[in-house]
Amino acid sequence: MKATTRFASQTCLGIVSPSVPSISDACLDRLEGCLGELTVVLPRSVEHLHEVVALSGEAYPLVLVIGGDGTVNQVVQHLDLESQTLAVLPSGTGNDLARGLGLPRRMSSYLQALPHFAVREIDVWRINGRRFVNSAGFGLDAQVLATMASSRGILARNYVFAFIATLPRLRTFRIRAEGDGGTLIDGDVWWLVAMNSPFIGGGIPIAPKAQLDDGKLDIVAIHACSRWELALKLPKVLAGRHFKDSRVSFHQAGYLKAESQDEVAVEGDGELMPDSRRFELAHAGRLKILCAAADTR
């Protein structure tokens, strides 16, 4: 099997998430055959990961993430967007960026497709100075992720079950959000999410028409209603039919500035951030990433 990517004769840094099971030597050999000389690092901590990536620019034109959206997010914080390209072998809980890119999520399928991958450029965004590539969420989403982070078993792995467990203690928040010169939202909401890709929470199509490379965020808000009504919206969201609901609003913007009366839970790419009252989301450049050639259009 001959590799067709332009990295086959170069060097690649592999970052492996701590949650990933051991990877066989045969798998590593196939990755190296496609991506070039491979150096694998198992970071001791988030700080160690940041340090390794920050120092990798000159030696490694390609960085491979073996993990999920959270590990991708941590790597992107210090990736040199000008000189480095990212590859993602999806091995996390959600893998929503991988879904948006059409990456195979089975190891055997991924290794079979990898030699035919091409470089695609997608948007990178910042929320309060921190980069994200898939999503930034306020309120409900971040509160559900906090439940997952503090739980074990199915609540730690399944977004829908974590949502149900979190529902009794969810609260709305009042927010005013502006984007591209106008007011988008002004009122009480359960959830405000800014999407670069269609998926969140392990495949939930919250923004079905979002495009990773259009320079726009798809902004979805679920406005105040009863908890019972909120629970009934979940099947609509899972089916991608929520935009027909009068309590759901949708906007597109290349910039978002928001302010809440109270501190709100915040997440970026599934990584929890400090609660805040003010949010500013802006375009932060373009990320070169390997994916199927059919997805480069």
Image (cartoon, helix red, strand yellow):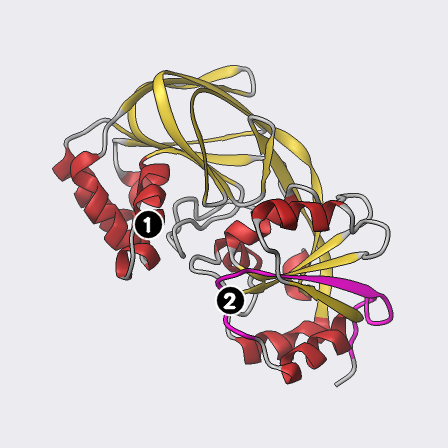
Q: Nearer the viewer, residue 265 or 115?
A: 265
Residue 7 within the magenta-colored segment of the rendering: yes
Which residue is label 2 attached to?
A: 20
The image shows residue 199 at horizontal and vertical percentages of: 44, 51
The image shows residue 266 at horizontal and vertical percentages of: 42, 32
34 lies above or below 139 = below
Residue 159 appears left or right of 53: left
| SS category of the residue bearing label 2 | loop
The image shows residue 115 at horizontal and vertical percentages of: 72, 75
**Distance between mark 2 and mark 1 Cα atoms:** 18 Å
Displayed quadrant of residue 109:
bottom right
Say whether residue 253 is visible: yes
Residue 119 appears left or right of 151: right
Displayed quadrant of residue 227:
top left
Q: Which mark is residue 148?
A: 1
Dominant SS of magenta comes to: loop
Pointer 2 or 1: first along the chain: 2
Q: How many marks?
A: 2
Quarter of the figure with the C terminus? bottom right
Residue 131 within the magenta-colored segment of the rendering: no
- Residue under the point 76% across and 58% down: 62
Displayed quadrant of residue 290:
bottom right
| SS category of the residue bearing label 1 | helix
- Residue under the point 58% across and 52% down: 72
Range of residues picked out in magenta: 3-22
Say whether residue 212 is visible: no
Q: Which mark is residue 163?
A: none
